[in-house]
Amino acid sequence: MLPDRLRNLSYLLARLPGVGEKTAQRFALHFIGEGRGLATDLGQALSELDAQIGTCEHCGNIAEYDADGRAVCKVCSDDRRDPRLLCIVAKIQHLLAVENSGAMRGRYFVLGQLLSPLDGIGPDELPIQRLKERIRAAGVTEIIVATPPSVDGEATALFLARELAHLDLTISRIASGVPHGGDLEFADRITLGRAIDGRRGMDTPR
Amino acid sequence: MLPDRLRNLSYLLARLPGVGEKTAQRFALHFIGEGRGLATDLGQALSELDAQIGTCEHCGNIAEYDADGRAVCKVCSDDRRDPRLLCIVAKIQHLLAVENSGAMRGRYFVLGQLLSPLDGIGPDELPIQRLKERIRAAGVTEIIVATPPSVDGEATALFLARELAHLDLTISRIASGVPHGGDLEFADRITLGRAIDGRRGMDTPR
């Protein structure tokens, strides 16, 4: 019933994360209804994207291509960042979240994925070689592993710690515990257990 | 933190129905991550859309522009459809749903919106003049009002019946009742009340 062009557009929209067939059709119809004109603007923005934006050749963060076709992100090209401190994250979204916290003064390395035996992602799928080269080239002395506190994230953190053990590095893992503003009453057992295991000394003024 | 181009893309994506800031950013990051290449395909499909697809000049359904820049939809250009039977719907999605049922052998008229005092949509916002012209020009003799069985849909149906009363037309309203496969136990009071009010005689074989 839909014209071919609109059906083709729906198929493409259904490839967005979390978008099913129905939602894709709703988007497609929006473009020819209330959202008239949006298609042209969005079309232009998207057409240019692949040629203009890529991932940073150092860390995997988002980066715009320069005139020479090279992509270096804002963090890696910022001289005020500490090159000896490296934060390892699973994906770009996590990098943005850590960056947003303002607590990281070093640089990043994006793994791209976590170890996940169920999805067939083993140690060979992780960019360990690139990571080691990065550590050597940038003279990194401290690593913060910021993979999520999930099964896959913990497995990946352990794997990284073991892989990098022979290098002369300080390696730490982000803290896991009750989130800011969280209620102890509704915290799950594992989170609370971790919050207690990871307790920190307090200054006791006399 | 995001490059300008990507932020601009997020803004545009957030204008899709049901898409918020977070989802828009997720879409935008998908284009430069796993969905590499999708941006170009989608960009092309969208760039062409406004120039190629519009709404049918007769009924408001989706239609492709022909060489002369006119848009007539598949239903209106199909000679096998009964031109005297007209089904009035609120929006294109509803037209597609009715068409999908295979129960409509006539043509359509898309109102574009329903009467909705709360949203400031009064009788003047409905294309009544265009509807009357269509009825006259096509020689329509029967109208099926297929606005949804909601407050706005019912109000619009009553309004249409009153507006078209002086024309020599058979006007009917789609049935409201317990849906196919529905359980009486879980039907709400209004639906069940309507199902009983709208009961139909049964053939009683002797």
Image (cartoon, coloured by chain):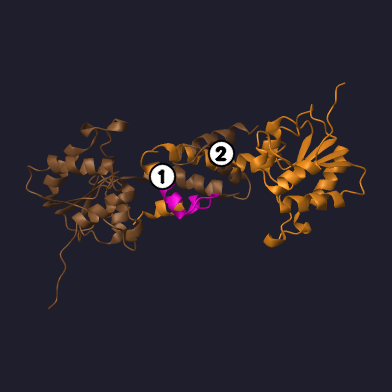
Chain colours: A brown, B orange
The structure residue drawn at horizontal position 32% and vertical position 52%, both measured from the top left corner, is: A188
Q: Which residue is mark 1?
A: A49
Give neighbour class at mark 2: few <14, some 14-19, many 20+ (Cα, 10 Å).
few
Q: Amino acid at mark 2?
A: Lys
Find residue B192 and report its horizontal and vertical position in percent: 72, 44
- The correct choice, above or below, for A16 with respect to B82 in the image is below
- Dominant SS of magenta comes to helix
Find residue A173 and report its horizontal and vertical position in percent: 19, 51
Nearer-the-camera pick, B203 or A139: B203
Pick the quarter of the image with the N terminus of chain B.
bottom left
Q: Is residue B191 left or right of residue A50?
A: right
The quarter holding residue A179 reads bottom left
The image shows a total of numbered marks equal to 2
Part of the protein shown in magenta:
B11-29
The structure residue drawn at horizontal position 25% and vertical position 37%, both measured from the top left corner, is: A115
Give neighbour class at mark 1: few <14, some 14-19, many 20+ (Cα, 10 Å).
many
Nearer-the-camera pick, B76 or A47: B76
- The correct choice, above or below, for B89 with respect to A125 in the image is below
Q: Give the label, 2 or 1, closer to the camera.
A: 2
- The correct choice, above or below, for A7 with respect to B90 in the image is above
Pick the quarter of the image with the C terminus of chain B.
top right
Q: Amino acid at mark 1?
A: Leu
Nearer-the-camera pick, B180 or B122: B180
Find residue A87 and report its horizontal and vertical position in percent: 21, 51
The structure residue drawn at horizontal position 53% and vertical position 49%, both measured from the top left corner, is: B16
Is residue A26 highlighted in magenta?
Answer: no
Judge whether residue B65 can be spotted in this image. Answer: no
Determine the chain carrying the residue at label 2: A
Q: Is residue A31 left or right of residue A91?
A: right
The structure residue drawn at horizontal position 87% and vertical position 48%, both measured from the top left corner, is: B164
Q: Which residue is mark 2?
A: A22
Give the mark, 2 or 1, whose residue is nearer the N terminus: 2
